[in-house]
Image (cartoon, rainbow, N blue to C red):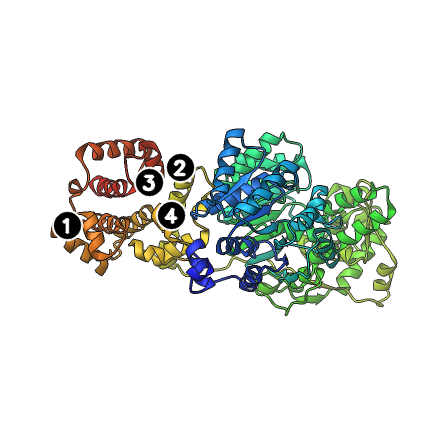
Amino acid sequence: MVSQFSSLENALKHFFGYDQFRPGQKQIINEALNNKDLLVIMPTGGGKSLCFQLPALLKPGLCVVVSPLIALMQDQVDALLDNGIGATFLNSTLNRKELQSRENAILKGKIKLLYVAPERLLNETFLTFLDFLTEKIGLSSFAIDEAHCVSAWGHDFRPEYRQLKTLRFRYSMVPMFALTATATKRVREDIIEQLGLENPTVHLASFDRPNLYYEVQAKSRRSYAQLLNYVRAQEGSGIIYCLSRKNVETIASRLQQDGIDALPYHAGMYDDERAINQTRFIRDDVRIIVATIAFGMGINKPDVRFVVHYDLPRNLESYYQESGRAGRDGESANCALFLSFGDLKRIEYLIDQKSDKKEQKVARQQLRQVIDYAEGTECRRTIILRYFGQQYKGNCDNCDNCKNPKPIEDWTIEAQKFLSCVARCQERFGMSHIIDVLRGSKKKKIEKYGHHLLSTYGIGKERSIAEWKMLGRSLIHQGFVNETTDGFPVLKLNKYSWEIFRNERKVEIAVTESLTSKALNDYNPRKAESDLLLDKLRQLRKHLADQNRIAPYVVFADSSLRLMAQIKPQTIDAFKKISGVTAYKAQQYGDSFVSVIREFCQQQSLPTPLPTASNMITLQLYQQGLTIPEIAERRNLKESTICTHLAELINMNQPIDINRFISEEKKAMIIKCIETIGDGSLTPLKNHLGDDYSYNELRLVRAWYRREKD
């Protein structure tokens, strides 16, 4: 089958609509085509699935994909089917009749990729079926997705994955591909051993996600208002992670009250309720999912535009994985962490509850790494990649520290004032009280304790409350002063505090600049125009997805919609050139998208294209009285292509009379159907009307109907 395409790039465009591979994909696919065992470590959004899907389409036989979650396999199969690719899954959601129908399709060679859970795959009855398939149509490969589940050292170990080594003994000649997003050296070695991979080629991709913007915000006292403002400033779908189930429910409820479509997700909910909320989020019925870490592996939504950690994550690996659920489509996305010392104390309390001292030590070390990341003034990307043992060049220009570097200043004198005030208040008060004393507050509490008589009273009036808080936080994080965790947080001096008093230690802090209003960028009418069209295209995508009961991103990725909004293709031929548009998708959805784009251009008084040269030839032959089959034969084109030309000519108000090609009775039935279920997609019309009506007839009547309606 490889010989059908002049290059792998041509095959990529044919099956998936993209013009070029992502980094590392082509090399992996070439090795897969050469029947090598593979271990692929590629971060979320790097394009792991394509590395086994394209070889499966180019090789004879069936590729069996092992997937741990039903939702994950359903999403991937939906996406493949919407590209016109033969794929299916077998799992517990199917009844006996559905199972038999799908098994028959596999036996007839109509399926190239079969998704199964490890439990079903290792069932003796299924293995017998697999033996029969091996003889009848052959197996091209086994793809073990989420392969870290094989290893007891992995972050999501599943015992049933350990038994997959059976496949190596039973089907020794079938290549095996193991794929996962993150795996330490120890986990990689364990995967190779447990699956019995033979001299595998190991592809370890960079952990860098260059499309993600990382930032840390100090969590204000009015933290919900801060979150609401952040959400309102973002575009598209988002995930908000919280530490507790209570926080999840509270935040989701408050967002709903403020007009934001949001739903909760946590382990305390019923399974059905969780599944419904996840599906509604994936299909863009709601914009926000508020979740605990229970919302994890198997979330196959590529167009999440932002992830917020409203509470502090417990370790840096979790933060990388959770924030990495943003921007899986390679488009720009934002990752924000809200830093609060209250969260820090809560996590420290939970750590203290652990009975194992070794576990406590590891957990504290992991928490320290999160704080180092959050408090760090160097490139965020550098800190994250260093954690995974990968060096980074430095300034990424896509994080808050690189975009807006905080100046480092010597605040030793201010630190001495602050610590002196802690000492003179006898180490019995928290940060807010110390700041009140330094700034000469008139609060009754100050006079009650006689602190208005202290030598440190009022010596810090020149600094704002925010500046003193910034210093206090920095002193705590650098370990220059301690803060108690038993109830009300109280500041306590330590050996470093006394070194600062004696001028034996300098205090340097990253100074957060005051928020200043920045001038808005010059209004860009071209961008505003594209954004307006993009919104219309998103609405159309959602409508078509709902009609076909699939997620919107399955129809087209955000990147494809943005290109449509920028390029504004007003013919099917131009539409086919958009990245992510296959010939199959152009036939399924092209008329609808081109129609919306053309209508938009007319409303904005943008130039409408003249008929193309190819359309003009079809028009001339039509004017000579030829039928559609005659025009197709004369031009050596498919009848569907000629009908597409005629539909485009109708849209351009050219004099095409569809009564020459379709009876009045059929035309009336199609119009009635359009008025009942809409004119967005041809597939629902075809399903409703049945086999007596062809797609060509539907396409022509729809074009005529739209023209008459306008």
**Disc number at residue 626?**
1
User: Is disc 3 placed on a helix, strand or loop?
Assistant: helix
Q: CA distance from mark 4 to mark 2?
A: 15 Å
User: Is disc 4 placed on a helix, strand or loop?
Assistant: helix
Give the foreground label among 1 and 4. 1
Assess whether mark 3 and mark 4 are in contact (beta carbons under 8 angstroms).
no
Inspect this view and state whether residue 300 appears.
no
Q: Is tag 2's residue or tag 3's residue first in the polypeptide sequence?
A: 2
Q: CA distance from mark 1 to mark 4?
A: 36 Å
Q: Is tag 4's residue or tag 3's residue first in the polypeptide sequence?
A: 4
Q: Is tag 1's residue or tag 2's residue first in the polypeptide sequence?
A: 2
Sort mark 2 into few (<14), some (14-19) or many (20+) by Cα contacts within 10 Å. Answer: some
> Residue 694 at what x, y percent from top left?
28, 39
Task: Please name the amino acid that badge 2 sits on.
Answer: Gln
For the C terminus, give its image quadrant: top left
Name the residue that disc number 2 marks. 547
- Give residue 94's quadrant in the image: top right
Name the residue that disc number 4 marks. 537
Q: Residue furthest bottom?
A: 393
Give the foreground label among 3 and 1. 1
